[in-house]
Amino acid sequence: MGAEMREYDYYRQVFSDRELPLAFVDRDALDGNIEQVRSRAESLPVRIASKSLRCRSVMEYVLGHDGFRGVMCYHGAEAAHLAAHGFDDLLVAYPVYQPSELRTVCGAVDSGSTITLMVDSAAHVERAGEIAAEVGVEVPLCLDVDMSSEHLGVFFGTRRSDVRTPADALAVADAIERTDGVRLDGVMGYEGQIAGLPDRSPANNAAVDAVVRLLKERSKRAIADRRGAVVDALADHGHDLRFVNGGGTGSLAFTTDDPAVTEVTVGSGFYAPTLFDHYDGFQHTPAAGYAIEVTRRPTGGVYTCRGGGYVASGPAGPDKTPTVARPRDAQLTDTEGAGEVQTPIEYDGSLALGDPVVCRHAKAGELCRNFASLAVVADGAVVETAPTYRGDGKCFM
């Protein structure tokens, strides 16, 4: 189990001379999460998910530890951006089809970077091959195998690839083999319904949570069978895979037991947003959040802060809203919640104008879309101000 977030007075002192709002990462907590991820992944190498981190400095820091290698990106231009800053072994987890984006990737490959693109159809393969041949490079491709399942007519998983059987995979692999400018490099089977779906959610009642846990257990066998069957079929037909990728923060224990998998991916587990407070079997330490400034006290027991409306993507609900982490027992109001320019909080304790209120985001990397930098906190001080992608002047999606 992870440790608790630091107490309020620690952050009040650290942020006392800082302009608010600000986003931060607590490096001491991050260190603990890195150790826990390394332990949970056992002997498998860990690829880091940039979507959850969105800060080059943090990614470099994690990759500097033993057992971590490569980056899973979410956009082709992002992969080229990271390649230009010295990152390598970049896997783009979502298909790239736009010619301009493909040319950007191919340009980085032509400069010596290893960027692997995701495909799940002959159309993806043909478009990638067309642009690669135009630029004069060979681009490695990863085959995305759908890991969703169906139980009693209920779809369970994420709607990604339509490659579900060995025959489906071989058809796309054959398309890669006959297309100039590309080659098959790896396979990914992301079990999103295990990795990204909490065992208990603030958005659900106890009955729904029980059904979710049951579906997660039932889907595990289908996931392992499908991923293994695809990898075996590709090997039997002479396809040499550099890697087989699986997993996420919420599924490490399950994924590392799959003999077909050669690497796992982790992103959110380094920051540990509120989504990951609700899993059975593990808990990481909250390592990232944001601080907003008390600017008003409209009535007793209510303090109003500037900014704060950083709501996560996905179906709207209480599991997507930020939470007040410190001071303890402070909470958002039911009538206003987290607001675009002001956020009132209910708190019986004493706060002064200018004091910070520390909040946690529901997801990991989406917070960085709203801030140009992360204040890196260690040993009771801000030791670095690290640019996020936004601070790099980039907005990939």
Image (cartoon, grey):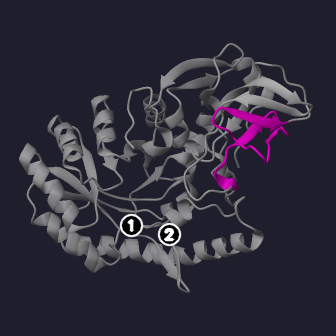
Numbered range of the magenta stretch: 318-346
Residue drawn at (84%, 26%) of the image: 297
Front-lying residue, 312 or 145: 312
In the image, residue 365 above or below residue 227: above
Identify the amino acid type marked 1. Ala
Any magenta on residue 340? yes
Q: Which mark is residue 157?
A: 2
Residue 260's tag is 1
Q: Quadrant of residue 273?
A: top right
User: What's under tag 2, amino acid-wise?
Assistant: Gly
Relative to residue 69, is residue 17 drawn left or right?
right
Residues at circles 2 and 1 in contact by the CB criterion of under 8 Å: no
Q: Is residue 128 left or right of residue 324?
A: left
Quick one: label 2 or label 1, which is nearer the N terminus? 2
Relative vertical location of residue 372 with respect to residue 142 in this rendering, above or below: above
Q: Position of residue 388 (x, y in %)?
A: 47, 30
Say what secondary structure mark 1 lies in.
Answer: loop
